[in-house]
Amino acid sequence: MKKTMNRRDLILSATALASAVVLPGCGGSDDIENRQDVVDLAASKPELSIFVEAVGAAGLTATLKGSGPFTVFAPNNDAFVALLGELGTTKDALFADKATLTAVLKFHVLDKLVARANIPSGKAIEPISGGFFKIDKVGDAYNTQDGRNRAGHVVATDSFALNGVLHVVDRVLLPANKDIVQTAQGTPSLSILVAAVAAAGLVDTLKGSGPFTVFAPTNDAFAALLTELGVTQEALLADKAMLTKVLTYHVVPSRVLKAEIPFDTSIATVQGSAIRINSNFQITDQRNRVSNITGADVFATNGVVHVIGKVLLPA
């Protein structure tokens, strides 16, 4: 009987010990893939060798070995090779430009832990460098859009380290390098808006630090407005007071991405009057005229542009 009890006690003790062991890769906030910091974890992945080399060249190794927590969106080797081709440069030249390299790498780092399940789909993500990018969850895919409106993908997620988490992306993310005015100037379908902003004397304002959200009417939208009002483009651009009132009605004094739009709520504009946007992304102005958002989330250094199909009019 005593021998049986000893065996039973041994089995119970072994079971209790097994239940107390946390196995790597089994989920939960304490699930650490291995006992390394994010730099050493990246160094253990052959597909991230250029990223690790870049971190060293930028002098960021000590930073990313710090206590964190960090979330790192690490570009794989193919992403760096593609970037070199895109920029028409070499790896040595890129690494020699420490200021640019540092800014680009910091654009991939968050000063908090964001696991895959907590990625804010479609909303602005602010890295330690400043600026912003976004990640859209589409089905099982996670698609990136950087500050220059370049698209990519998150191809691996949730490699946990002692001081954060590592996600792998297939395109190097670049911060924005054009303000809202420059962005509009580079869009042929917004040429009348660009002319109107200049005629109203609003160029310097919209090149300011912001952040701004601009609802940008297309050339077709302006053509329709001219017909609606029975005026010419020259007459519209010559009426600076009215033009300023109309244009500032298209500007919100904060950054609002498409996924961040508060539906069926009054949204104050720089002009002072409000607009309302419904869940179909239709904007109602003060005269109850409705415009569709036809192109959303065009990023700039000082905000975001949404393209719309009708010029909005205040009361």
Image (cartoon, rainbow, N blue to C red):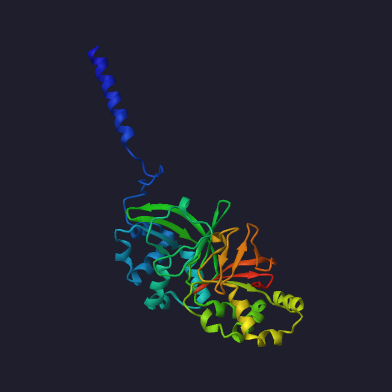
> Can I make out residue 194 in this image?
no
Q: Percent x, y for residue 277?
A: 62, 62
The outermost residue toward the left is: 2
User: Residue at 26% of width from left, 16% of height from top?
Assistant: 5
User: Residue at 32% of width from left, 71% of height from top?
Assistant: 59
> Can I make out residue 250 in this image?
yes
Q: Percent x, y for residue 261?
A: 56, 61
Closer-to-camera residue (139/131): 131
User: Residue at 34% of width from left, 40% of height from top?
Assistant: 22
The outermost residue toward the front is: 315
Q: Percent x, y for residue 285?
A: 65, 67
Determine whether 164 is above or below 2 in the image.
below
The C terminus - image quarter: bottom right
Left or right of 208? Residue 250 is right
Q: Quadrant of residue 39?
A: bottom left
Determine whether 79 is above or below 137 in the image.
below
Closer-to-camera residue (140/211): 211
User: Residue at 63% of width from left, 77% of height from top?
Assistant: 246
The N terminus - image quarter: top left
Closer-to-camera residue (89/304): 304
